[in-house]
Image: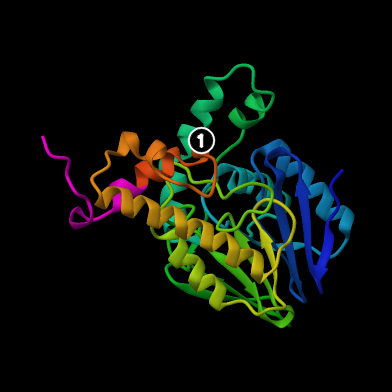
Amino acid sequence: MPDFTEVAERVWVARYPWFDVNITLVGGERGLLMVDTHGSAGAAREVVDDVRRLGAGEVVGVVNTHWHFDHTFGNHTVREAWPGIPIHAHENALTELSDWGGEVKQRYADDPDDPHRDDVLATQIVPPDHTFSSAIALDLGDRAVELVHPGRGHTSGDLVLRVPDVDVLLGGDLVEESAHPSINSDAWPMDWPLTLDIVLGLLTPASVVVPGHGAPVDREFVEDQRNELGIIAETIRDLANRGVPVDEALEAGEWPWEPRYLMHAVRRGYEHLPRSQKRLPLI
């Protein structure tokens, strides 16, 4: 059974085995802010039980770090437990969850062998209802937290949450510790390194960074991950500039990760490069 572990004063993190996803609680005199809600109604019920077992207060709000279902499909269950609480997210995350959440459920419907299939299909998708475009502060009474959209990366609607009084930053899936950052078909690999430059500007050498998946890390870890993503982006740019076709790029490039992790990265990168940075093959 996962336990909420206090990583800084009144900041607790629980790491759940399914997707190795982190759920974080930030406490203030007005109550708890829950950051991400897990991937289904059933998974979120476990989170609710764990929050109540912690006994640190009532949840007064939710933050979704981005739209992906392993971070948002628990919204309905959490709001059932604490009726009427606001759900905060970047405006693009609202659009993406509304547009693509149904596709996630269809993927589970098409896979009768997945042990989470029935739970995901029974989950009611509840999108965020409090959105912002650039940055916003949330008041927990004796503590303010900052939601910042540093740019596109893992999705177009990523946010990070900063708790300034204890130098903690929740990175969502812009930072991952237990695996390489996931570059999916909705990612922005050419923007991601620059987005992490903004995130690094919010950190100090003593910052605790809670990733979307895995154990807490420090600023140096984020720098290293930013540099790997930067190599990927520049390799894509170089290959396209030399006229290497997208279907040959994975084999032609020298990558910091195994190529099997970069299929979407290469295709998305080629799509996002301006025409002036692509040399068309001679026919």
Residue that label 1 marks: 260
Q: Based on the displayed image, in which of its 4 quarters is residue 237 positioned?
A: bottom left
Instruction: Residue at the far top: name it.
Output: 112
Identity, as a three-letter code, of the amino acid under mark 1: Arg
The answer to which of 12 and 88 lies nearer the viewer is: 12
Which residue corresponds to the image point at 82% horizontal and 47% vertical from the top-left?
Answer: 49
Q: Give the left or right position of residue 11, taking residue 123 as reference.
A: right
Quadrant of image for the C terminus: top left
Which residue corresponds to the image point at 51% horizontal and 58% vertical from the top-left?
Answer: 129
Q: Position of residue 38 (x, y in %)?
A: 67, 45
The answer to which of 206 and 48 lies nearer the viewer is: 206
The answer to which of 23 and 213 lies nearer the viewer is: 213
Q: Position of residue 139 (x, y in %)?
A: 64, 77
Q: Position of residue 226 (x, y in %)?
A: 53, 62
Quadrant of image for the N terminus: top right
> Is residue 32 visible in the rendered structure shown here?
yes
> Which element carries disc 1, helix, strand or loop?
helix
Residue 55, relative to residue 262: is it above or below? below
Q: Position of residue 198 (x, y in %)?
A: 49, 73
Residue 112, relative to residue 10: is it above or below? above
Q: Based on the displayed image, in which of its 4 quarters is residue 88 positioned?
A: bottom right
Q: What span is colored magenta in the figure?
A: 269-283
Which residue corresponds to the image point at 84% horizontal and 60% vertical from the top-left?
Answer: 5
Count the numbered circles shown: 1
Tell me if residue 271 is in the magenta stretch.
yes
> Is residue 88 visible in the rendered structure shown here?
no
Q: Give the left or right position of residue 120, taking residue 157 as reference.
A: right
